[in-house]
Image: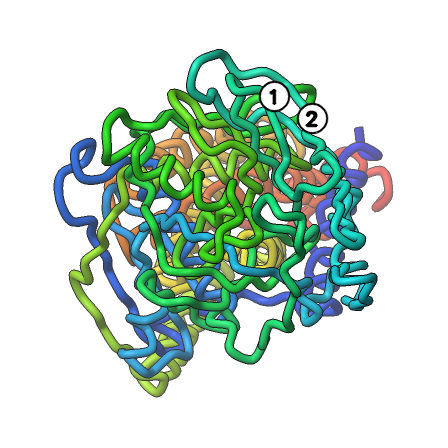
Amino acid sequence: MRRKLLTSLVSICIIAVGLLAMNIGLGYRPALGLDLRGGISVTLLPAGQSGKDWTQASLDLAVERIRERVDSYGVGEPEILRQDNAIVVNLPGVNDQKKALELVTVTGKVYLRPVLQCVADTSAATTSSSTSTSTVGTATTVAGASTTSNAATTTSGASANTATANTATVGTGAGGPSRRTSTTAPPGTGTPTTSASTAVATTTAGATPTTSGATGQSTPTTAVDQSTTTTDNLPVSDPTKTEVLKTFDKKNPEICQVGPSGGDGTVFEKDSAQAQIIGGGWGVTVTLKDGAAGTGVWNTLAAECYAGNSSCPSRRLAIELDGVIQSAPSVNAAQFSGDVQITGSFSKGEASNLAQVLNSGALPITLKSQSVQSVSATLGKDSLRAALIAGAIGVALVILFMIFYYRRLAIVVVFGLAISGALVYSATSLISRFYNGVLSLSGIAGLIVSIGVTVDSYVVFFERLKDEVRGGRSLRNSAQRGFKAAFKTILVADAVSLIGAAVLWYLSVGAVRGFAFYLGLSTVMDIFVAYFFTRPAVLLLSRSRYMGGSIIFGLETEPSSATKEVLA
């Protein structure tokens, strides 16, 4: 029994000290919230009615896009929360309200734009190859534009032989069901041929076809000026102009010159896009709306890109959202009806992301700024200092009272609070590091309040122990019986605190959630420390010479039998 108690006591001490040392050594520490660091808080609300003017999926996508924009700008420890239908964006360290509004302004509008030309994004860290150009006859060949296995188009003289890897059905063309097919351009033509009943497109990341039209003549690829890219920091897109945009592809990033938008995501049916297995690989299926506003707009763009006209010489159609090209599949059929299938070297996550983008584009969301609040950095430092002083005074008063009332037994309270503090600090640091959590002033208030919850556990145990000693039992026997009875009361009391914290977190918004979260976290730690530290510590002390014959609770305790033998 003694060995088990020592093992429990030593283990929790090692865990607490080890986690604390690890966090300090790695430089992990709690990330301070907006009210402690200073910055700007923006609250956004969607315009219109849910289900009619926007969907929950659109709102989720807006949160992701805001996070991408904020991360790309380099804001340290941003906090982006969705609270029911509101989006709260806290930007610590940002003091310019205009810049803050630019960061959080997303349109959720998907545009369909013809691709004029693309080159590999040599500025991206993931790009391992460079772009080189060589001339054979009258054709231009772009080699090494990507690290993917997709084959690039090679043109020699007046004939072209096009091989497209990972070619799969993209949709149902006029007159028949969709099916898997491959495309090959006959000599002398640069236009792939397909079955009349099949509409085909291919996602060829990094491979830039250079042929256009039916003449077999190549369109020389000119350099794209990467300095004009509109997505370096804050994506700004004007669908009425020709622009240079980056692709969303992380593995094979490109920079593409795109023409004015010929349509938007409203050509698709709402919530129709799905990620699914198509031809042995992941792809996306989306349904076109009937009529001129749906199928008519899509087919106009598809016909231009399929023919390789001057408006779309690359035969690729960009799907753009907030200044970033989400996908740019090649269009290998002039007419579509019903479903459109987009396939390529997609992972399941990439296909799901594209499907979410298309669903959002079918019913784009418009976010309105409800409030913009500035928090002074000086005020935040003053608040943090005041909170720390208040916490230190509270802990000191509690410890003094416990020492005055419980005398030697108060050593358990001192070390127990230290263990709890180390565990809470480590947990808060890890949450900040890996889950983008922040410690706000309300969170600190929750931690200070939790000191009372923790001390209540000691009071319940010690008072029960006092009753057992007063009943004439030895301290050793009283400690064992007292903890069994007291722990049930501790569990019930902490369960009440946890339920209150959970309900408060679920129903509240903003800073109150921080209070509820850290109150709940500290309560869980209290249960853990009570069983693995307080219990073995008190039981071991009750058997030691340290407590034998001493006065606790104002009562004289008799030495334990083991102590009597040692004294004899």
Q: Is residue 66 left or right of residue 422?
A: left
Residue 521 visible in the displayed image: yes
* Residue at the image position 32 percent from the left and 50 percent from the top: 108
Mark 2 or mark 1, which has the lower sequence index? 2
In what element is the residue under mark 1?
Answer: strand
Outermost residue on the top side: it is 176
Vertical side of 170 occupied by 41: above or below: below
Q: Nearer the viewer, residue 370 or 542?
A: 370
Q: Amino acid at mark 2?
A: Ser
User: Tags 2 and 1 in contact by the CB under 8 Å rule?
Assistant: no
Q: What residue is shown with label 2? A: 182
Q: Which mark is residue 455?
A: none
Q: Nearer the viewer, residue 473 or 7?
A: 7
* Residue at the image position 76 percent from the left and 56 percent from the top: 18
Q: Disc 2 or disc 1, which is closer to the eye?
A: 2
Q: Is residue 364 left or right of residue 215?
A: left
Q: How is the image coloured?
A: rainbow
Q: Position of residue 111 (x, y in %)?
A: 36, 50
**Residue neighbourhood size for the residue with mark 1, other residues' Cα within 10 Å, grouped as few (<14), some (14–19), many (≥20):** some
Q: Position of residue 466 (x, y in %)?
A: 49, 39
